Every structure is written in C-alpha cells, then in structure tokens.
Image (cartoon, helix red, strand yellow):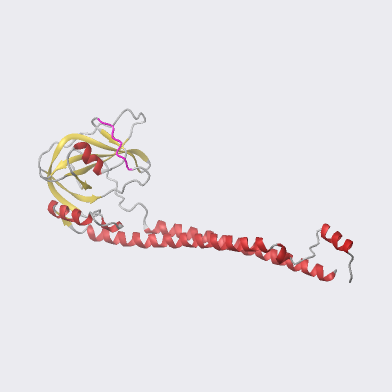
Amino acid sequence: MNMSSSTSTNLTINGVVTGSPLKRYGGSIVIFIILTVAVFSTLVKLGLWQLSRAEQKAQWQQSLNERQKQVLNFKQLLSLNEQAGTATDDFSGLSGYQLTVIAQPVSEQILLLDNQVYQGTVGYLAYQIMSVSAQQPWILVELGFIAANKDRRILPNITPITTSNISLSGRIYQKQLNPVSDQLLPELGNPLRFQNLNIDSLSQLLGHPILPTVIQPNQLPNVSLPHPWQPIPLPAKKHQGYALQWFSMAAVFIGLMAWIAIRFVRRFKINKQHLNAI
C-alpha cells in the first residue's frame, strides 16, 4: 500500500507510530534496565548484609555463653583488658565474663546514665565507683535501673554503698559508644547525671583511670534495683527478619519491573501489527 507524505504525516499526528518503537524508546529502555538492576542489586545486598550480621551475632552469642562459664579475678580482668585494647572486632570486648572482687567505695557519689528504657519505663542506670587497689584503675559497679521523675529537675534518691571490703560477684559488660554522640555531657552534682557512658571522659573528669568495663553484681547490700542485661542489642533472629524483608522487597520490585516490561512488549507488538496492517 502506497501512502502519500500527507497521509504519513496524518498518521503520525493521530498517534500511530510510523518508526520502530525500539528506536523511539531506546534511551528509556536503557535507563529502565539500569535502574532495575541497580535497585534490585541494592536490595539483595542489604539482605545479604543482614544475613552476615545475623551470623556474626550468632557467633557473638556463642562466645558470650562460653565466657559466662569463666570466673575472673581482678588481675585476670586487667590482663584481658590490655589484650582487648588493640582489637577492633565485635568479639574483642569483655562482655559476658564473670568477675569476683573485693572492693570498697571510692566515695558516696552516685552516677546516673540518662535516657535508659527498661520494660517500657524511661529512667536511669545508676552506678557507683569502687576501688580494688589504690594503685589500680577503679571499676564501675551498676546499682541498677531506676525510673525517672516527670520533672527532670528532680533526680532519684539512691542510697550509696558504704560498706568497706565488699565482696562483688557478677558479670561484666562494655557499653558501645553512641556513633551519633559519645560525649559524656555531665551535670555536676550528687547524683551526677551524664548522657553517654564514655569512660575515658569520666576518668578525666574524676582524675583517676577507670576500667572500660562495668560489673553487674548478682547481689548488693541494701540495693534491690533491677539489672537490665542486653549485651547484644539486636539478636541474630532480628537480623534474619530484616534480611527477609529486604529479599521480599527485592522480589516485589523485580515483579513490578517485569510487569511493566511485559506491558511494554505487548504494546510494542500491537503497534507493530498495526503498522504492518497499514
């Protein structure tokens, strides 16, 4: 069938594609493919990263279980702290070991770590500083969790430990620094309220070295506060759940892109058939 130039022009104006749709949409197709591959790859990589973190957390949990069977004295704790000082992986810390020491309070100063949550209640983790030996670093003793007053100007009243040569037995842990803000930000007084458990800054403030560990005693005289214990912020199962979410998003995304591609191919075939019929 022969067509005049005017007929060809009219067909174009009326929306009939007179050239190859692949040529017309070639650039869009390339962008579509690149976008699909990039987004799908990113979602899959995020899922694989969560699986990797789940495996690390499972190994960490196994390491904690083994550590809880070991009871250290203060000398062994100092030795392990020196060894862990140059390590950088998640398993290099001292969390989970059991510790038994005889110590005495440095003072009646109570330390309050702000913005803590326990069983849905906002409050503080209370600490007191103990000394094992005058020539050795001090150690922080966790007294427990106490709820905060609605009025932040009112701090909780906690009776400090005053017993000399007190026997302490419990597990030790190390809190990871907040990557957003790790400043101590102390509010001087008694109790001393601070925002982050930055032990280096606390040591400088008090003028004496403090071990970068906290002992959570099994029992304390005249203190009955609860002791939260969460050495692993997110367990392996949480990471596995997040991995499933990322993989599900990848599956939904690739399904959506496939549906769009199929619709495009069908439209291309319809246009081609229409051109062949003219």
Horizontal side of residue 31 vs 64, given as left or right: right
Residue 186 painted magenta: yes
Can residue 224 be seen here? The reply is no
Residue under the image location 24 percent in, 61 percent down: 66
Quarter of the image with the C terminus is bottom right
Q: Position of residue 2 (x, y in %)?
A: 89, 70
- The overriding secondary structure of the stretch rendered in magenta is loop
Q: Is residue 95 above or below residue 130?
A: below
Q: Nearer the viewer, residue 226 or 76?
A: 76
Where does residue 63 sit, x and y in percent of width and height? 27, 61
The reply, left or right, for residue 274 in relation to residue 231 is right
Image x and y of residue 62, in percent: 29, 62
Tell me the quarter of the image containing the N terminus. bottom right
Q: Residue at x 25, y 41 (%)?
A: 201
Q: Residue at x 69, y 62 (%)?
A: 25
Is residue 264 shown left or right of residue 63? Answer: right
Q: Is residue 263 above or below residue 122?
A: below
- Furthest residue in direction front, as rendered: 5
Q: Where on the picture, by quarter, is residue 256?
A: bottom right
Q: Is residue 125 visible?
A: yes
The relative height of residue 223 versus residue 101 in the rendered view (above or below) is: above
- Total numbered circles: 0
Write the start and end of the magenta stretch as one range.
182-188
In this rendered view, identify the residue nearer to me: 6 or 98: 6
Q: Looking at the picture, does residue 161 appear above or below residue 170?
A: above
Q: Picture quarter containing residue 79?
A: bottom left
- Identified at 37% across, 31% down, the residue is 150
